[in-house]
Image: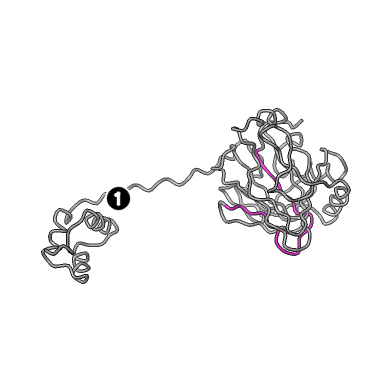
Amino acid sequence: MSAGQAISPELREWLVAQLAAGHSVPSLRAAMQTSGWRDDAIDLALQGIEGQAVVVPAAEPPPAEPSTAGLPGPDLSNSPLYIDAGDRRVQVLQTMRHPRVIVFGDLLSDEECEGLIAAARQRLARSLTVETQTGGEALNVDRTSDGMFFERGENAIVTRLEQRIAVLLKWPIEFGEGLQVLRYAPGAQYRPHYDYFDPGEPGTPTILRRGGQRVATLVMYLQEPGQGGGTTFPDVGLEVAPKRGTGVFFSYDKPDPTTRTLHGGAPVLSGEKWVATKWLREREFI
């Protein structure tokens, strides 16, 4: 047998793998003959492999879906097209199980969108993010929007919207943070991030004293940009278009990346995007 036809461990592993994939011994023999292998070398390579039991590894179980027990969110067990949110019938446009994402249509009227923008416009400032190192707030280069917060129940539109959200998501008004309104000018974005507070950061215990962990997020689109500005979920390749009056809701059963709730605001390419965000906590937010 020539050196070029030495029977290596790698060759034997390859043959075993082909058997496991369903190829027959005669088909392997024919393939080796076609490739120029001599019969004596083929016999040696297949020695001990013919008739060998092939052990097929058990398939890994699919990742467990997040639990929805004890979390905000509507009952989707009957695949409803519409949900009664008290003062408004809201559309269910899209759902995903893991991450748990629901896109709502007709969540706000045009008048409500305009009213929130008008009330927020005079109070805009460069958006801050919660600083988990200290428990305070800080500028973040990943977030290039302008924003402000309404207190719960601050005006008639906010009060009406908070009540609607509470009915829609089956979560008490008191468990929600104040409504945040953001404006994204051309080029502004919010790079992918998680909304829960990292348990490993030193400032997190201070943050949690105000209402526990965040457990869900609702982003509502008040004004559509000309182009760009979608809400992205990089882990699952999902992008939600920022259509006015629509909202995207997602929940997370634990503060961990396995929830697959990494998300961001894609750069606005033209026009302005305005959004209102409601974060929901485990208990009353004070």
Q: Secondary structure at mark 1?
A: loop
Q: Position of residue 49 (x, y in %)?
A: 18, 55
Q: Which residues are magenta?
A: 215-234
Instruction: Tell whether 166 sits left or right of 97.
Output: right
Residue neighbourhood size for the residue with mark 1, other residues' Cα within 10 Å, grouped as few (<14), some (14–19), many (≥20)? few
| Res 160 → quadrant | top right
* Residue 253 is inside the magenta segment: no
Q: Main secondary structure of the magenta part?
A: strand
Q: Position of residue 172 (x, y in %)?
A: 73, 36
Q: Position of residue 125 (x, y in %)?
A: 82, 46
* Badge 1 amino acid: Val
Residue sitting at 13 percent across and 59 percent down?
44
Residue sitting at 61 percent across and 49 percent down?
78
| Res 244 → quadrant | bottom right
Residue sitting at 81 percent across and 55 percent down?
109
* Disc 1 target residue: 56
